[in-house]
Amino acid sequence: MKIGNVFSAFFLSNPFHRGMFELCILVGTGICGLVYSWRGFSVFPVSNILGGILILSALAFHGWAEKDHKQAHEKSGKIGKIVDTGVYGKIRHPLYLSIILQNIGIALAFGVAITFVLALLTIIHWVVTAFQEEAALMQTFPDEYGQYRQKVRWRMVPGVF
């Protein structure tokens, strides 16, 4: 199997499983960091409170986006139609954005530096996932997804990306 095929297969696999794996890693390093007194942020407890708020906001946003996209936790190959209503009418990957925000919130809530570094790496993971998914959707729905991309210009953050 070619490296490109393995790469695509990973990023187009079930996002729920990948997200849960990341969650376990982030929470695990956060707990270890607290138990073993690993280097943390000097803005305690502000970072903890901000992290908690970010986690709750991300979870609420995730739930809101899931209401519009019932197939959200399926593999990209199993998606049957393009969703362009609700929050999907403003940004193309609201669920990935909510996961990124949640992961940063977890890192801030624990206040452990290594957890924050890992959370930053998850940003790369979800951005690459968005690119891979868009390529797959363009192959599956060339006309419909092309029109959707023209209508909804922003992947995750309106006016930025």
Image (tube, helix red, strand yellow):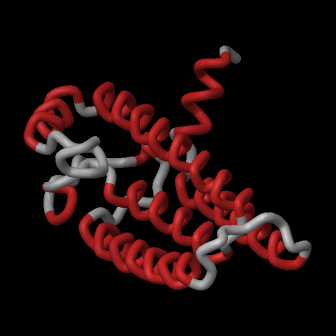
Indicate the quadrant containing the C terminus: top left, top right, bottom left or bottom right: top left
The single residue placed furthest to the right in the displayed view is 36
Residue pictured at 29% horizontal, 28% vertical: 138
Q: Nearer the viewer, residue 15 or 96?
A: 96
Residue pictured at 28% horizontal, 44% vertical: 155
Residue pictured at 41% horizontal, 72% vertical: 58
Determine whether 66 is above or below 161 in the image. Answer: below
Does residue 99 appear left or right of residue 9 in this picture? left
Determine whether 60 is above or below 81 in the image. Answer: below
Q: Nearer the viewer, residue 82 or 34?
A: 34
Q: Where does residue 33 sit, x and y in percent of width and height?
A: 81, 70
The single residue placed furthest to the top in the displayed view is 2
Does residue 114 appear left or right of residue 74 in this picture? right
Quadrant position of residue 26:
bottom right
Q: Where does residue 8 sit, x and y in percent of width and height?
A: 55, 29
Q: Nearer the viewer, residue 123 or 130?
A: 123
Indicate the quadrant containing the N terminus: top left, top right, bottom left or bottom right: top right
Does residue 97 appear left or right of residue 17 in this picture? left
Q: Where does residue 78 sit, x and y in percent of width and height?
A: 42, 46
Residue pictured at 52% horizontal, 70% vertical: 105
Q: Where does residue 36 sit, x and y in percent of width and height?
A: 91, 73
Determine whether 158 is above or below 10 in the image. Answer: below
User: So how many labels did they put on this image?
Assistant: 0
Determine whether 52 is above or below 114 in the image. Answer: below
